[in-house]
């Protein structure tokens, strides 16, 4: 199909409001949850053929918790199709099995609903969230609303497409290697991966020797991300982390920020570097101190993360019949999953050393923030690729190289457990969103949100309908 820009914004109950504004309208009685859900369903149906973001629709019976005083009560949203919601299937983006309706709701999904968000369905992801683009071996990809010929990122690509296109203002995402922040950068959104344990632990992630997976949301405004985290904290607060509360704007404290332009293993492209440098200059103009820093996570970290990625693929292939469905067919997994499994089967003997080194990353990461309040870097090493560049049908060795050259910054936060946020600060020469990334110490989401507010206030994010 010819590349085009697609959005669903219009003159209905949703308008151009963010989630905070819609929740306020519901509290005032100016609009009801049912009216918002109906408008979101119409918007979803209007873009579904062009963008392919919805895995399972529940427009006829949205899920809405009973707490009318919840901060985001009545705001329409979607869950990603790798978290269980009772009565809906969880198919993990895979053609290797066909899931039946889930019998129970996952703990994080309960937390998500506790904020007052109503769930209209589930969004598409690449097979088991392993890819950085929401593409499939034998199905239509999720397309980027800014340019339908380009990737929407992954693994939370369906959620990103819905939020960027204006179907809903906020949607669930989760992140095991960048899967909140990658689609945020690709689709012009705010994507914060919280500290590990800030929210209810992901049920798949906590089964792993090192839990890489953290849940969160994708939004179009910093205040929506802040409002979600504050609302979620009312349901569950991890007392081992500093309380967050509601962050409402830029802070007064001037920060020392480390600047990274290239990862230790791959150089960023020219447009990406220029955007990070521009954001660094903006932060410096606001009074923050910017110092160049070299990250210590180089080629050995990349090799170790790749083998651990392969371990995850191996576990999926080996246990699918037991954990997912008796009809699970490992031979029908896509080329990326099978290729990663192959890495593990060849190099499994390295796993004890890999786990030891990856577990040490948490302390090494924390050490960076004894010097810096935050670290500014690219979100991704190059601009958003066209569809097909990261297809699971690309020969595996080439696909792996492409993924490593693209996703060069975000995995460190997953291994270390530290928070990171992607922000839609710029645009490419081709008119696509271009994001930067900020990291902070464990439990320091407030720092990230305050810096994000400062950047958004000083230069509001570009709008798809503008």
Image (cartoon, helix red, strand yellow):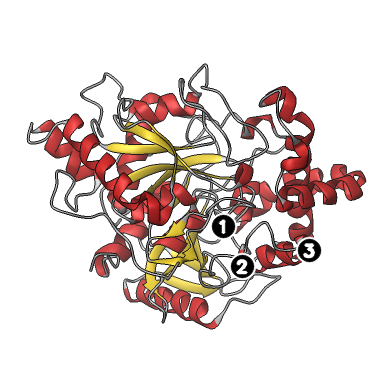
Instruction: Kindly identify the residue that appears in the image at 70 percent across and 34 percent down.
Output: 208
Number of other residues with Cα within 10 Å of mark 1, as a class: few under 14, some 14 to 19, many 20 or more: many
For image coordinates 48% across by 54% down, the residue present is 142
Q: Which residue is mark 2?
A: 389
- Tag 1 residue: 133
> Would you say 335 lies left or right of 91 here?
right
Q: Position of residue 398 (x, y in %)?
A: 74, 67
* Residue 285, percent from left and from top: 33, 76
How far apart are the alpha carbons under marks 1 and 3?
Answer: 16 Å
As drawn, 34 above or below 276: above
Badge 3: how crowded within 10 Å, few (<14), some, or many (20+)? few
- Secondary element at tag 3: helix
For mark 3, what is the residue?
397
Marks 3 and 2 sit apart, C-alpha to C-alpha, by: 13 Å
Residue 37 lies in quadrant:
top left
Q: Quadrant of the N terminus?
A: bottom left
Q: Quadrant of the C terminus?
A: bottom left
Q: Secondary structure at mark 2?
A: loop
In the image, residue 269 sits, relative to residue 75, either above or below, namely below
Asked which secondary structure carries label 1, the reply is loop
């Amino acid at each position: 199909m010819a590349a085009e820009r697609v959005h669903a914004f219009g003159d209905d109950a949703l308008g151009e409001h963010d989630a905070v504004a819609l929740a306020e309208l519901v509290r005032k009685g100016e609009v009801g949850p049912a009216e918002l859900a109906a408008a979101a369903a119409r918007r979803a149906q209007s873009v579904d053929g062009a963008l392919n973001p919805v895995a399972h629709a529940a427009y006829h019976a949205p899920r809405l918790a009973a707490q009318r005083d919840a901060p985001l009560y009545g705001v329409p949203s979607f869950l990603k199709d790798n978290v269980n919601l009772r009565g809906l299937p969880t198919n993990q983006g895979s053609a290797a099995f066909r899931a039946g309706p889930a019998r129970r709701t996952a703990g994080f999904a309960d937390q998500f609903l506790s904020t007052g968000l109503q769930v209209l369905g589930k969004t598409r992801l690449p097979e088991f969230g392993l890819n950085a683009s929401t593409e499939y071996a034998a199905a239509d990809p999720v397309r980027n609303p800014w340019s339908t010929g380009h990737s929407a990122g992954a693994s939370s690509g369906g959620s990103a497409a819905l939020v960027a296109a204006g179907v809903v203002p906020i949607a669930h995402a989760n992140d095991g290697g960048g899967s909140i922040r990658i689609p945020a950068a690709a689709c012009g959104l705010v994507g914060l991966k919280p500290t590990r344990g800030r929210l209810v632990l992901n049920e798949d992630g906590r089964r792993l020797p090192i839990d890489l997976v953290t849940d969160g949301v994708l939004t179009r405004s910093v205040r929506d991300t802040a409002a979600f985290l504050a609302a979620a904290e009312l349901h569950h607060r991890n007392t081992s982390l500093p309380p967050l509360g509601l962050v409402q704007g830029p802070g007064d404290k001037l920060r020392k920020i480390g600047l990274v332009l290239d990862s230790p293993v791959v150089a960023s492209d020219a447009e990406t570097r220029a955007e990070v440098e521009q954001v660094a200059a903006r932060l410096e103009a606001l009074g923050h101190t910017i110092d160049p820093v070299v990250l210590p996570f180089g080629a050995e970290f990349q090799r170790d993360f790749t083998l651990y990625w392969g371990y995850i693929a191996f576990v999926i292939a080996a246990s699918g019949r037991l954990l997912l469905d008796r009809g699970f067919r490992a031979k029908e997994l896509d080329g990326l999953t099978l290729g990663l499994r192959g890495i593990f089967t060849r190099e499994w003997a390295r796993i004890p050393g890999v786990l030891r080194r990856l577990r040490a990353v948490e302390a090494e990461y924390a050490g960076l923030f004894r010097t810096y309040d935050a670290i500014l870097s690219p979100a991704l090493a190059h601009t958003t690729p066209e569809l097909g560049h990261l297809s699971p049908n690309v020969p595996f060795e080439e696909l792996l190289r492409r993924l490593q050259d693209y996703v060069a910054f975000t995995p460190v936060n997953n291994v270390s457990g530290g928070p990171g946020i992607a922000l839609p600060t710029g645009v490419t020469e081709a008119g696509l969103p271009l994001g930067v990334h900020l990291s902070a110490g464990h439990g320091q989401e407030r720092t990230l949100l305050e810096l994000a507010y400062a950047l958004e206030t000083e230069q509001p994010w570009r709008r798809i309908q503008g």
